Image (spheres, rainbow, N blue to C red):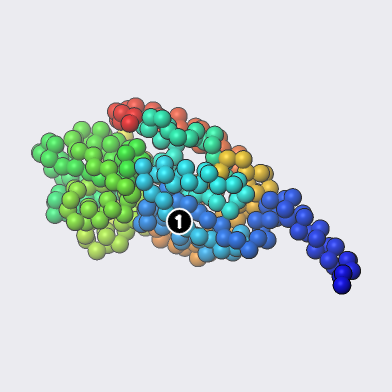
């Protein structure tokens, strides 16, 4: 027996057709999670930020949010994986300024930045701090730390989450500004690097404050100095390197959201609106403040311009500290 087409079923059919025709509407109504593929390991600053905001992002997007870490090759593996997905808003990535450093430090990059992606927003900045294993480099201040490194040239090493990352560049900038020598040991992610720093296999590193706050508080790691131009409210007792005699050493990490190339304007708007809502959620704002993160969400247009201008700025820094493309 055929069922008659009622006004209700006709309207339902029209709504379904509209959802398919307008990707932003489909994103809001689909019973399917939005996946954030992170090109960073668990425990990194970007990972902490994303997982903190995930519940609020899910509510703003009208669906659940899944966070998937795909670290490796300094973050290239995760970015490639994300870029291969359909530009429908269901696969996104939270990234640090690593992504605009890559073109200057990696030969034969398997994608164009930002041309092979859709920048959606710069979300904020996270503070960087230089931390040391206190058993390996005992010191009570930045000046003592620098003196210890100078007294033993080539006797110390530092770790990073991978060659050419913001943490690598920030540490190389410190070595350059302080006039010291230290050997770089790259890791496949921040988590393994911090584990070895705690274990004494490496001596120091520049890291995002949220990823090591607990270790600083416990005394397992010594916070030598903040890398920004002013102290951070989440670690008010840690002086900047500017205060400790290195006025030229100022660097922070920003983070933003990307999608695959070709995302439509309705989908981009939907995701951007969700970011604004989620990061203004009171619980998220409080958590970000405790981590020391500063939230300032750009417009889509500002993000697209910033990705290109930041590539130029970091290219100059890479050249200054002498990192050779690999």
In the depicted view, which residue is nearer to us: 184 or 17?
17
How packed is label 1: few (under 14 Cα within 10 Å), some, or many (20 or more)?
Answer: some
Instruction: Indicate the position of residue 211 as horizontal and vertical percent values.
Output: 34, 56
Seen from this angle, which residue lies furthest left? 151
Find the residue positioned furthest to the bottom: 1
Q: Position of residue 64 (x, y in %)?
A: 56, 63
Residue name at image x 38 percent, y 49 percent: 71
Relative to 216, 95 lies left or right: right
Q: Position of residue 54 (x, y in %)?
A: 51, 61
- In the rendered structure, the answer to whether residue 28 lies left or right of residue 295 reads right
Residue 119 screen position, x and y as percent: 55, 42
Q: Please give the residue where the numbered disc 1 appears in the rendered image.
A: 68
Of the pair 163 and 3, the residue shown nearer to us: 3
Q: Residue at x 60, y 61 (%)?
A: 32
The answer to which of 158 and 279 lies nearer the viewer is: 158
> In the rendered image, is residue 55 in sight?
yes
Picture residue at 34% right of the left edge, 37% below the top = 164
Q: Which quarter shows the N terminus?
A: bottom right
Judged left or right of residue 324, residue 27 is right
């Amino acid at each position: 027996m055929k069922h008659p087409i009622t006004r209700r079923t006709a309207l339902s059919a029209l709504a379904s057709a509209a959802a398919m025709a307008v990707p932003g509407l489909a994103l809001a109504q689909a019973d399917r999670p939005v996946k954030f593929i992170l090109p960073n390991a668990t425990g990194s600053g970007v990972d902490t930020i994303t997982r903190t905001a995930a519940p609020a992002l899910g509510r703003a997007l009208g669906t659940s949010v899944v966070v998937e870490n795909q670290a490796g090759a300094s973050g290239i593996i995760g970015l490639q994986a994300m870029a291969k997905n359909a530009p429908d808003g269901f696969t996104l990535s939270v990234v640090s300024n690593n992504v605009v450093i890559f073109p200057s430090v990696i030969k034969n990059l398997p994608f164009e930045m930002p041309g092979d992606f859709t920048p959606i927003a710069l979300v904020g900045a996270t503070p960087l701090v230089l931390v040391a294993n206190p058993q390996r480099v005992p010191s009570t201040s930045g000046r003592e730390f620098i003196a210890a490194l100078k007294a033993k040239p080539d006797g110390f090493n530092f770790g990073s989450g991978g060659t050419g990352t913001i943490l690598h560049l920030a540490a190389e900038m410190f070595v350059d500004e302080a006039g010291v020598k230290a050997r770089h040991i790259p890791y496949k992610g921040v988590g393994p690097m911090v584990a070895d720093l705690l274990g004494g296999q490496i001596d120091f590193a520049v890291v995002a404050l949220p990823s090591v706050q607990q270790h600083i508080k416990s005394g397992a790691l010594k916070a030598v100095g903040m890398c920004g131009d002013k102290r951070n409210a989440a670690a008010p007792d840690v002086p900047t390197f500017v205060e400790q005699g290195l006025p030229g050493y100022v660097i922070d990490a920003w983070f933003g959201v990307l999608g695959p190339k070709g995302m439509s304007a309705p989908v981009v708007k939907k995701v951007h609106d969700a970011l604004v809502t989620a990061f203004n959620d009171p619980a998220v704002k409080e958590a970000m403040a405790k981590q020391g993160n500063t939230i300032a969400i750009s417009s889509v247009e500002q993000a697209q311009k910033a990705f290109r201008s930041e590539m130029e700025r970091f290219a100059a820094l890479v050249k200054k500290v002498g990192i050779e493309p690999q």
